Image (cartoon, coloured by chain):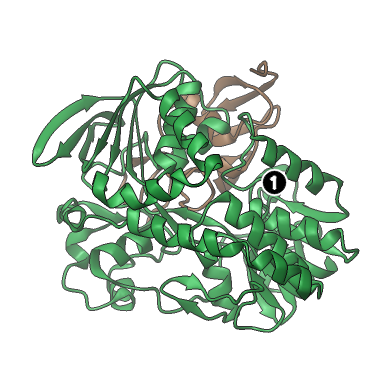
Chain colours: A green, B brown
Amino acid sequence: MSDAFDILVVGAGPAGIAAAVTAAECGVRVGVVDDNPAPGGQIWRSGAHLPATAQRWKARFEAARVTHLQGWRIVDCPEPGVARAQSNGAEISHHSSAHDERDLHYDRLILATGARERFLPFPGWTLPNVMGAGGLDAMVRGGLPVAGKRVVVAGTGPLLLAVAAHLAAGGAKICAICEQASFGQMAPLMLRVLGQPGKLLQGASYRWATKTSRYLTRCWPVEAQGDQQLRSVILQRDGKKWCVECDYLACGFHLVPNTELAALLGCELESGFVVTDEWMRTSLPGIWCAGEPSGIGGVELSLLEGEIAGLAAVGKTDAARRLSAGRRGGLAFVRALERACRLNPNLRELPRPETIVCRCEDVPLGALLGRPNWRDAKLHTRCGMGPCQGRICGGAAEFLFGWHADSVRPPVFPALVSSFLGPEALDAPKEAV
Amino acid sequence: MVEPNITLTVDEIVVRVASGTTVAAAALMAGTRTRDSVSGEPRAPLCGMGICFECRVTINGAPHQRSCQILCEPGMQVTTGEISRR
């Protein structure tokens, strides 16, 4: 099955929603493809009260003349102007196939693929109930009850407070909020937030919601303990260690941009981010990029960049340029956030030789020591070769060893063999690759 | 809070959830893990957003489903403990 769009937007978080709405309101044919069960991305995931801004944008998104492919993932870009998409869970309900896979034809492409959490390995981090900070938050928004559960929130970044506040609102007992950065390292970010009433109010409300919980800087988990699931966490601060019994450890070390699709298409990347100009154009003609893949800057900047990309992609460059001026403050915030979340080098000492780094293939740290680069590690240990394709251990390996992924090849996401065999193969039984 | 209106089974345990609940959340309501790793460790969701593949389960006989990205439907039969041996 095939569809054709003037503009295809990948991702329906704030940046993708803003890009799609802005472009569609200019009268062009817009398609949006998004991996999640509902639009909103991670920050506006449903299942919780959404801020007024989110409700306004989501309402505009629902009202816009946009073709939604919600719960679809892009697995390949077989030729310029074509993205191959597959429906999530199509195999569950039926065996038909023609509607499960589509080649989406586009004239222009806007990448709004968002970001994921950075995970760092430490002893016990593979135990059930050790999750990402955003990870546990997403699970709770997906219906997991946390009332009465004891939760340690740890890692780095403003996300920790937001997550703690949301979990507390769901009835969880937040044992501690552990921020790896020092107060001094975060001070410039806080000063910048003081000048932004919206962010200040938000931060203050999060802290108010978690006022009975300790917020500890220069503090991180050194071990998660338990047999079949998490029972307790050893925390460390300034060389002092202590044990906290808990039901969940929500631990994420800031964010890593999702740049796999941009890399597959051949867009230029710099320091791990997609290179964009003032109109959010990538290095390739006809491809724009908005939101976190071009720099981790939060909701407001993502919305602005989405609008700029949407306007620029329909040729309204003057309007896009007017918005672009408002981006400077956001870019300064990106830099301040990056510095505030810089990881303490001591975190490299957390994993032991037997601690698993690659969770898909169960590759321990010891197997990676002495490897010269990511490619060598992949070839010799299968690190990063499992179904997540290094999306989890890649961020850790980058921090632990300074390794960078050297190439992205299709399928960019695990896919059915039938996606690559053509229509005549669709009647054949399916096997996952 | 939305009332539970969907009934499904996870490893033959009956679970009642509200609409909009992910299969991953339902799996953790019924048990403690979603899959076994290649070396046999129990694993449960990590990222919650479709990236890490730790939440893989079998749904209605279809293996390798990312349960955090799929919503519960009435009568679903979910099996955890999927083993991905080398």
Q: Residue at x 48, y 58 (%)?
A: A296
Instruction: Look at the image and tell me in which quarter the N terminus of chain A lies.
Output: bottom right
The answer to whether residue A229 is above or below residue A11 is above
Task: Tell whether A49 sits left or right of A251.
Answer: right
The amino acid at mark 1 is Pro
Please name whichever residue, A207 or A167, is drawn nearer the observer in this view of the structure: A207
The answer to whether residue B45 is above or below residue B12 is below
Please name whichever residue, A102 or A425, is drawn nearer the observer in this view of the structure: A102
Instruction: Look at the image and tell me in which quarter the C terminus of chain A lies.
Output: bottom right
Q: Residue at x 84, y 55 (%)?
A: A66
Name the residue carrying label 1.
A39
Q: Is residue A223 visible?
A: yes
Q: Residue furthest front?
A: A195
The chain carrying label 1 is A
For mark 1, give the secondary structure: loop
The image quarter containing residue A289 is bottom right
Q: Position of residue A261 (x, y in %)?
A: 58, 70
Q: Position of residue A304 (x, y in %)?
A: 65, 58
Q: Residue furthest right?
A: A27
Task: Tell whether B68 sits left or right of A311.
Answer: left
Q: Position of residue A259 (x, y in %)?
A: 52, 68
The image quarter containing residue B59 is top right
Q: Position of residue A53 (x, y in %)?
A: 68, 41
Q: Is residue B80 visible?
A: no
The image quarter containing residue A106 is bottom right
The answer to whether residue A165 is above or below residue A155 is above
